[in-house]
Image (cartoon, coloured by chain):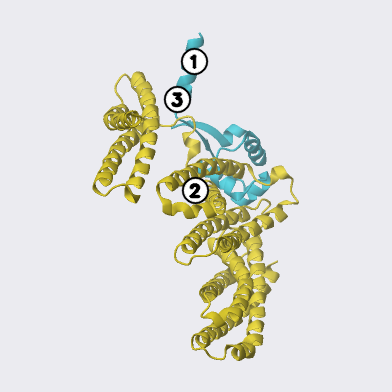
Amino acid sequence: MKRLLKISNTTTLILCLISIAGLIFTNTFFLMLRDKIVNMGNVESFMNKFSIPVALVYCIFVLFHLSAMFTLILQLNFFKRENFLRAFLFFTGTVSLLMLLGDFALASDISKEYLFGLPGEFNILFFSQALHFVFYILMIVLLALTRKSILKKSEEVVLKDDSIFINAQYIGILSGISGLILITIFSVLSLTVYPLPPWAIDAGVIVISLMAVIPYVLIVLYWLVIKLNERISGWYDEKQYQDITRASLITLIASVIIMALIFIAQYFVSSLNFFNEIWFPFYIFLVLLLFSASTLYFNKKGPDLVSREGNIDLSKRNKNLGLAVLIGGYLTLAFWLLTILLSVEIGLGWGSYITMGFFGLLMIASGILFLLSLVFNIIESRENKHMSRGLIFTIASFPPIAFSYLAIFIKALTEGH
Amino acid sequence: MHFVNYYLYNKLERKNLKLNNNLRRCRFEHHEISQQELANAVGVTRLTIHSIEKGKFNPSVLLALKIARFFKKPVDEIFYLEEE
């Protein structure tokens, strides 16, 4: 294993250095091609002249990517410790490998469309080149950092490996974040700055989503292949079971709240209509991000829940609850006043709708919290035979909350007539 | 009588009890074995042993018994309740 890893590291390093030289060559080629198109030069003969060398360089790129992915998997097996750089490289390496195929498609599109002007595909092509460059440089950094430790480290026996589990969470976070950001930017741009037909938007969203999710699918498949030798009950150890259970609950609650907020916001803000195109991949990436991030948190830095079991500091909780109601109540009032001010001074529009949305959410949240805080603090005050601080906060929050509900109630009654 | 039991139960529940352990000491007394070696012996990940030692995770009864058997000690010599 150690020998194989050393050979693989060296091969990858050599291929990486050749690929960097190749990347400089391909970039120069694409820049010159762009100039030829802009200056109406003889594009066809230029492409014919360089198409074979560029194709050969791309073959080296593919070889390097495959070698790099193999090395990364060997390193994951050898080191038995999670490492963010390794996970990041697995993610960027997979995306970069997929983008190599994309480069071919883009180059083919450019060769067909250049007669109608400078094709927009060049922007994506240069973005792809930048991604390859980042991957190559970081790969050199990883190979340099691990070179000595491979020589020093003796092979460790690990019967239940947790490094793949944690690395999968890192990759899940990266996939989730990149998916959310890229599909949002793409759909906003394709509806506003660069208008595209609906089929092109759908195709773009699908391609971006696949690009972002494939690294996660690959690491999960790899984890599954390792686990196939074990019984299903032994796939996770008991702490991992507990962590993913907690993470699932957090994901369920948080995803429902976030999706509900976006759904409500769509009623008030018409520019959020782009969300109709991407709601499904958006939801998938949101769930992936929340689940991976919360699993990682519980697995690595979980709160000291054991020592608090069965003995939560009730008075502190009740005080915080009271404080939250107090802040929520006065914020509700502030948003009510802001909504009135905006509606009167500026008129109905974006601003007033947004503040109205916040007012509604705050009013509901502070109403529920008020009732909870009231019940808990009354129980605590009765037990301790003195008024708790949380109860004082709760009582102080009553006027703004009551005012808000009363105002809505009166408005509903008067609008009916 | 029922009320007395209920009162005593509540009193006990409200005490700040936490599960503590001597796992780290046991490891060092037992040929200074590493967390990974103990994890391999009882069939969990290293991070689980680490979390138990740090007091961030309560092991199941089965795992506590496996650990106790590994160190050839009674469970309550390794895991014990402590008042905060």
- Does label 1 or label 3 sit earlier along the sequence? 1
The correct choice, above or below, for A119 with respect to A246 in the image is: below
Q: Amino acid at mark 2?
A: Lys
Residue identified by numbered label 1: B6
- Element on which disc 2 rests: helix
Q: Nearer the viewer, residue A155 or A143?
A: A143
- Element on which disc 1 rests: helix
- In percent of width and height, residue A167 lies at 58, 57
Disc 1 and disc 3: Cα gap in Å?
12 Å
**Residue lying furthest front in this view?**
A417
Asked whether residue B68 is in view, the answer is yes
The quadrant of the picture occupied by the N terminus of chain A is: bottom right
Q: Nearer the viewer, residue A35 or A80?
A: A35
- In percent of width and height, residue A213 lies at 60, 58
Tag 1 subunit: B
Asked whether the residues under the numbered discs 1 and 3 touch, taking CB atoms below 8 Å apart as contact, a structural biologist would say no
Asked whether the residues under the numbered discs 3 and 2 touch, taking CB atoms below 8 Å apart as contact, a structural biologist would say no
- In percent of width and height, residue A55 lies at 66, 82
Q: Is residue B81 left or right of residue B69?
A: left
Residue identified by numbered label 3: B14
Which chain is yellow in the rendering?
Answer: A
Tag 3 subunit: B
**Which colour denotes chain B?**
cyan
The correct choice, above or below, for A382 with respect to A372 in the image is: above
Tag 2 subunit: A
Residue identified by numbered label 2: A301
The correct choice, above or below, for B71 with respect to A219 in the image is: above
In the rendered picture of this protein, how many numbered marks are placed on residues? 3
Q: Residue at x 66, y 54 (%)?
A: A158
